[in-house]
Image: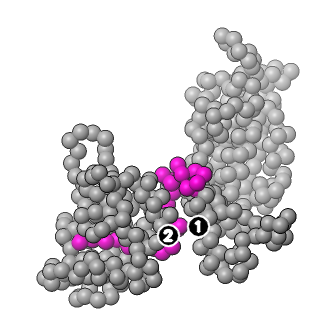
Amino acid sequence: MKKVTFITAFPEFLECFLAHSVIGRAVGSKTIEARVVNLRDFAVNRYGQVDDYAFGGGGMVLMAEPLAKALQSAGAEDATVIYPSPQGTVLSQELVESLAAREHLVLVCGHYEGVDERFVETFVDLEVSLGDFVLTGGELPAMVLVDAVARLVPGVVGKISAVEEDSFFRGMLDTPHFTRPSTWRGVPVPEVLLSGDSAAIEKWRKQQSVARTIARRPDLLASANIRPYLPKRPYLFLSGVTAALSGGLQLLERPARLYGFERILVVEPEEDRLHQLSARTGNAGEGEMTWVKFFKTAQQAFRWVSKKEKESPCAVGIEERKSGHSVHWLEAKRRILESGKPLIMGLAGDLPEAQVLVFPPRGGFEGEGELDPAVLLSICMDRFFGCR
């Protein structure tokens, strides 16, 4: 968002908002261009009338013609026109990110009972709601929306890292924050925050974010990318059969890199097939590979990860068919985060003694066929590690 325009019958609300704090600095530095259009400048008579009684009974409704003329004056031909309304899409961080990519946003602030529906149907691109409640006018939700979107505009907030650590940016709640004094009314700041150990502080913050999300808003796990909250990058586990099936190894390399996996671990006891798979990766023989590592047994692979990470891993198996021991993928996310262990993910049939078994993706129709293993694993990678 480089430009924002407000259309309102109460411009003083918005003028104060645009003159202070972070938004005021952004407007002052021309990082964001902002304009407030006074709807009363387009009134239908000399008394400044912009509203009238609703047909069929009810309160006052903003008239379509003043709104249309105000919108035309804003030069909004290529703008995204947004009407804050209880009937709209509920505002979320995902929607905020989408709106931040638009060049020009026009916020039409309703009042009283709202605006003439004919204006909405003709000019409005998106109705947005703050939640299931009603406010007196659209100025407050318009300010909230612009404040949220502006934070994602480069140059508005000093460090983009500060934005990325906020609640909901990665799908998780924010960590608790503290400032001076170090002890307040007998309650000290967590010792790790005073240690100066940046790695320990980062680990503590991630643990707190995970704990808060699970305790307060477990529903957020559905959209959360959990990889940044894992103690280490995850590993993808493949049997030689799965890796060779329909070019599975080649098909999975790209998504494994995209979703931040540390390595692909391939277990193949047969020497001939091992060499064939190794040749497909551009490597010859066994041993340390730049991206794919080969083992003769699953036990060797697990011991290698345990030695590398200095802790035994948590193995998560994706089932190709639902069993009586499998859990929903949201529950699997929670268990992975609570374990705090390095993660190995693969097909349940390939992974020996997996601690967590996950339902396979389902379409909800009878007679569903099984998915190709590479497709199945790619879908699950996105559910666990995709940015929403």
Residue 207 image label? 1
Residue 216 is situated, as x and y percent measured from the top left of the image, at: 60, 51
Q: Amino acid at mark 2?
A: Gly
**10 Å crowding of disc 1: few (<14), some (14-19), many (20+):** some
- The alpha-carbon separation of the residues under discs 1 and 2 comes to 9 Å
Q: Amino acid at mark 1?
A: Gln
Question: Is residue 219 found inside the magenta-colored segment of the image?
Answer: yes
Q: Is residue 166 left or right of residue 350?
A: right
Residue 342 is situated, as x and y percent measured from the top left of the image, at: 44, 73
Q: Is residue 309 above or below residue 147?
A: below
**Residue denoted by label 2:** 340
Residue 226 image label? none
Identity of the residue drawn at 75% across and 49% down: 34
Residue 156 is situated, as x and y percent measured from the top left of the image, at: 72, 61
Q: Pick out the residue farthest to the front.
A: 186
Q: Pointer 1 and pointer 2: residues touching (CB < 8 Å)?
A: yes
Earlier sequence position, callout 1 versus callout 2: 1
In magenta, the rendered stretch is 213-239
